[in-house]
Amino acid sequence: MKRFGLDFGTTNSSLAWARDDGEIAFCDLDPRAVNPRVLRSLLYFSLEERGFVVGRRAIDEYLAENMQGTLIQSIKTFLATESFQQTWINDRYWRLEDLIAVIFRHVHAVVRQLTDDEDVALVMGRPAIYVDRPEREALAHERLRRAAQLAGFFDIQFQFEPVAAGLAYEATLEKPELAFIADLGGGTSDFTVMRLGAGTRGDRREDILASGGVQVAGDSFNARVMTQKLAKHFGDGTTFRSMEGRQMPFPKQLVHQLGRWHEVSFLRGPRTRDQLERIKWTSSDPKRIELLEEFVDGNYAFFLFQEIERAKSELSASERTVLRFDKYDIHIEEPMTRVEFEELIAPEQREIERCMRAVLERSGCRADDIGALFMTGGSAQIPAVRRMFAREFGEEKLRSQDFLTSVAYGLGVVARDMTVSGSRLGSEEA
């Protein structure tokens, strides 16, 4: 039996192989990417019905076809959403698990290239919490399992992503350590407190003192920039006259959808388009409503959110940046300083901090007891986030490795150690 660990992330995915010799090896999921170990968790459906593609190729074909097909990103975010049952793409309905299975089939094809063994075991990562409602939590978990089965994986087990990150960090240790693990990704921020020890294997459930998470992370920061800095170019702040003759503010629900890349496409629906047409007719600034219509019709959301990502990354190293966007009649040039960005994301950061402290309290430990704080995930590179953890635990305790592949490596460790001891390390069997 061959064993693999898959980190299916909101933004990026990666795969580790637990080799027969006990070594953990990363698999190249996307040869077109700058880092072939990392696959962008997105898929593209061409209007020309040539099927679907994933990762960097999805972006390339989307651009080559002038943004006319359907590009889907952050699909993991919908796992716990009961209202998302199916969507219509290229003359057929797709359930959420069908769409996720497209990405997993790509992963399965990579596995088949590496081994002819039909008996493959997969350890998949999952957030410490999808949502704070048991029935929706169960729905998310079941959808993820079904998607893996549709892709051809049948021996499936799950492990919390922050626990997997902790196991990746453990592989670097020479002596036991009590660690707080922070996995700050695109969709969720997940934490665990865990006793780590060099060379430790077997049943580790007693070593996991507490785990928890919150649905606030990189996508939430991007949404804050979009709604607070850029939405004004697309109607936010304008007014219109209702059918009853009252002066009304631009609908906050539309601003909310505008702030989430994976929801912008919903603005193309006929009901919303009719609503925008009525608003434009009596708007205090109809030009900005026209720009919103052009933004939606032109499928420009991908480009603007890419610019937000670029600016966010630049502010990790610089004190200021400029958000620039220039397509059709949409001309945006918005300066943003690091201080301003940190003020924008302060509410989300407070949610992350509250969750972090709650997990620490449930573990029965104090910050002084923690020997190291291991940070992984793309959002762990944001200076304000790192300062928050440094204030709580001390700058000297902060540790990090590869921000995008640590979880996959730890899932590979889980898969390997199951072969040795039969232990699930506190994971769940599908």
Image: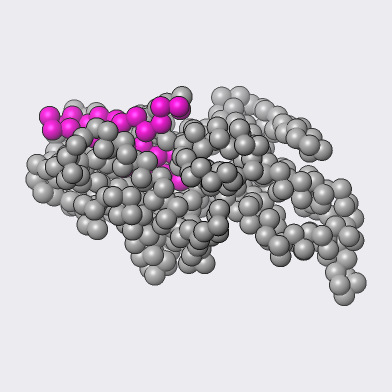
**Which residue is drawn at the image coordinates 30% and 54% (left, top)?**
149
Q: Residue furthest bottom?
A: 244
* Residue nearest the observer in this picture, 58 or 84: 58
Q: Residue furthest left?
A: 421
Left or right side of 290 for 265: left
Magenta segment boundaries in residue numbering? 6-33
| Quadrant of residue 252 within the rendered picture | bottom right
**Which residue is drawn at the image coordinates 82% and 49% (left, top)?**
290
Give the percent coordinates (x, y) of residue 112. 26, 37
Quarter of the image with the C terminus in it: bottom left
* Residue nearest the observer in this picture, 75 or 135: 75
* Residue nearest the observer in this picture, 129 or 122: 122
Give the percent coordinates (x, y) of residue 94. 48, 58
Question: Is residue 14 highlighted in magenta?
Answer: yes
255 relative to 391, above or below: below
Residue 4 appears in the figure: yes
Left or right side of 232 for 372: left
Left or right side of 397 for 383: right
Question: Is residue 23 highlighted in magenta?
Answer: yes
Give the percent coordinates (x, y) of residue 173. 22, 30
**Which residue is drawn at the image coordinates 27% and 41% (left, top)?**
5
State how many labels appear: 0
Quarter of the image with the N terminus in it: top left
Give the percent coordinates (x, y) of residue 2. 17, 40
How did the renderer colour the structure?
Answer: one colour
**Which residue is drawn at the image coordinates 72% and 31% (left, top)?**
324
Residue 407 appears in the figure: no
* Residue nearest the observer in this picture, 174 or 409: 409
